[in-house]
Structures are given as C-alpha cells and as structure tokens.
Image (spheres, rainbow, N blue to C red):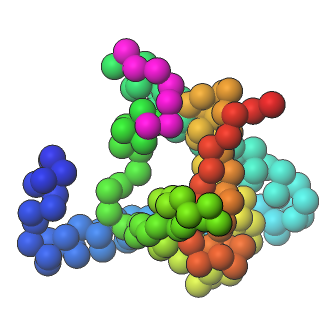
Amino acid sequence: MTENQKNSLPPEVEAAWTQDVRLAVRRMALLYHAMTTNLIRILGEEEAKRLTDQIVWDYGTLCGQAVRDAVLAQGKPLTYENFRSIPDLPSKGWEHGTYVDENRIAHGTVSYCPVADVFAQYQTPLARSYCLVDPSKYEGYDPEHTMRHAKHVMDGDGFCWIVVEKKN
C-alpha cells in the first residue's frame, strides 16, 4: 500500500488499523512483562536483568541485520536515511511529534509508544531494558554507529528522541 493510499483511508479504517496494531503490541508487551516477572522470581533481579538485556540485545541485532540486508540488496549505502526507508515497525500504533532542541533544530520523536504504555500500566520490571532494542537494532544495521535515547518517556520525558552517533 502506498503512502497516498494510506492517507486516503476513511478515518474509521485508520482507527481500526491503529487499534489492531496496538492490540498486537499489547500482547507482546504482556509477554515481556510475564517473562521479566518470572525471570526475577526464579533467578533474582541481577541475573534476570543480565539475561533480559542480552536477549533484547540479540533480538534487536537480528532486526537491524534484516534492515541492513534489505538496504544492501538495493545496492544502497548504510545511512540513517536508508535505515529509515526499510519498514521494520508497523506504520500505525505509535504517535509521532517534533522536538526542537536548543539550537532550534527540529527532530522527529515518538510521543506515544504502546509498549511503554503497557509497561507503565503493569509496572513491568526491567521495562527500560526492552528499549535496548533501539541501539542494538542500529548497531546490527551499522556496527560503526550506535543509537541512544536522548529523551525517553520511561525516564520521565514526555516523548522519546533517538540520536544516532558514530562510535569512537
């Protein structure tokens, strides 16, 4: 479906599509909640965090490698723009905004994350560890760069803002 076709859908179809994505994401977030809760109960918090961090990092790396493979298959270089050109997440479910930094530069943000919403609702243990998926995904895509959350809703910010940086 082209972007123009997506934009021409009736509002009730758009709303149903968004709701369907959020329901699927909710199920995944609840699975993560059950996993981390049980890992802590069985292994203790320190070992559960270590294992969860590794699982999420490996998962993100696989996601990033898939994006890398798709970009390279098109004969394109590994740039941030090309990373963003390959669909990796649903086009619905999340809400986006703009953050203007102290230098008056506008940056895209995520103003609503359905994963973070479920984690907050259920007070999911090790919730912030899930967000390692972002830097690991980018490093799986391009090992010469990393990605970090300059702002994060689970850290008390009103949105997530991700910055890509060259590794030293």
Q: Is residue 149 magenta?
A: no
Identify the residue at the far bottom of this view. 121
Whole-percent x, y for residue 29 in the image: 54, 66
The rendered magenta stretch, by its main secondary structure, is classed as loop
Q: Position of residue 161 (x, y in %)?
A: 59, 61
| 98 w.r.t. 86: above or below | below
Q: What range is drawn magenta here? A: 75-81
Point out the image quarter for the C terminus: top right
* Foreground pick, 85 / 59: 85
Give the side of residue 132 with respect to residue 18, left or right: right
Count of marks overlaid on the render: 0
Name the residue at 44% across, 37% down.
81
Q: Which quarter of the picture shows residue 40?
A: bottom right
Magenta stretch contains residue 80: yes
Q: Residue at x 56, y 31 (%)?
A: 141
Quarter of the rendering containing residue 57: top right
Q: Is residue 125 left or right of residue 30?
A: right
Q: Position of residue 87 (x, y in %)?
A: 36, 43
> Is 6 rendered above or below residue 88?
below
- The answer to whether residue 153 is visible is yes
Q: In the image, 95: left or right of 15?
A: right
> What residue appears at the point 15 percent right and 47 percent down from the top-left corner?
1
